[in-house]
Image (spheres, helix red, strand yellow):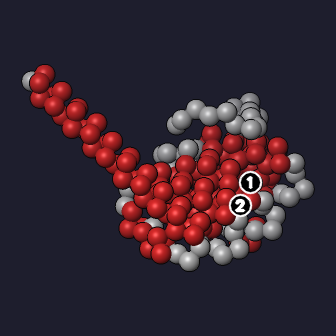
């Protein structure tokens, strides 16, 4: 995972067991009465737990039922954080796709969601239908995501080819 400067530190889940409780952290994340700082802390703790369950818990903020209680700023950060969960982020793709195609969702969420999807998938066919989306933010962000997929796969293929050549020269 790429090291970033988070706007809030995760809770210390190694010392306090309540911060390993995915249900508790989900409640904090989704609670509009909690400070944004604590909601971020819950999200970053879920990211650090790095399980499919914690990934899906973060995704709850993208669901329509939480549309009015989870701000665009929070959901933008959610999309970014989900892309950091390399081992488990496949679980986030359907949630992100739903948010990106919600006509009422903020542009910043749609954009960051599609960029995140571009980091998560290798098959551009999953999103290429969005290239013709009526919302220019969606269609243009989809183009960016597809370009990112192609670049990442090309870099990976180049690295693998170099590894193979190096291995062959060592034999």
Name the image quarter holding residue 44.
top right
Question: What SS does tag 2 mark?
Answer: helix
Pick the residue in front: 83 or 114.
Answer: 114
Residue at 54%, 35% in the rendered image: 2
Name the image quarter holding residue 33.
bottom right
Residue at 52%, 37% in the rendered image: 1
Residue 90: x and y in percent read 49, 56
Q: Earlier in the sequence, mark 2 or mark 1?
A: 2
Q: Residue furthest top?
A: 170
Residue 137: x and y in percent read 59, 66
| 61 to the left or right of 1 | right
Say whether residue 23 is visible. no
- Mark number displayed over residue 66: none
Pick the residue in front: 117 or 12.
Answer: 117
| 51 to the left or right of 107 | left
Residue 82: x and y in percent read 59, 50
State yes or no: discs 2 and 1 in contact (Cβ < 8 Å).
Answer: yes
Q: Is residue 38 above or below residue 167?
A: below
Of the two numbered discs 2 and 1 in the rendering, the one whose residue sits closer to the viewer: 1
Residue at 71%, 60% in the rendered image: 61
| 32 to the left or right of 66 | right
Estimate the spatial distance between the alpha carbons at disc 2 and disc 1, rounded to whole Å.
8 Å
Q: Is residue 129 above or below residue 121?
A: below
The residue that mark 2 highlights is 61
The residue that mark 1 highlights is 74
Would you call the spot at circle 2 few (<14 residues within 10 Å), some (14-19), or many (20 or more)? Answer: many
């Amino acid at each position: 995972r790429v090291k970033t400067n988070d706007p809030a530190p995760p809770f210390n889940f190694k010392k306090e067991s309540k911060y390993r409780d995915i249900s508790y952290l989900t409640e904090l994340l989704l609670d509009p009465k909690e400070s944004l700082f604590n909601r971020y802390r819950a999200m970053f703790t879920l990211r650090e737990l790095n399980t499919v369950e914690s990934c899906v818990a973060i995704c709850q903020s993208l669901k329509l039922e939480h549309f009015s209680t989870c701000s665009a700023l929070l959901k933008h950060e959610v999309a970014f954080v989900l892309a950091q969960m390399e081992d488990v982020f496949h679980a986030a793709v359907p949630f992100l796709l739903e948010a990106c195609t919600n006509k009422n969702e903020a542009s910043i969420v749609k954009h960051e969601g599609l960029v995140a999807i571009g980091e998560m998938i290798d098959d551009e066919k999953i999103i290429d239908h969005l290239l013709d989306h009526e919302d220019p933010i969606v269609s243009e962000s989809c183009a960016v995501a597809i370009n990112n997929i192609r670049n990442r796969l090309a870099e990976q293929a180049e690295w693998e080819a170099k590894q193979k050549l190096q291995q062959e020269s060592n034999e």
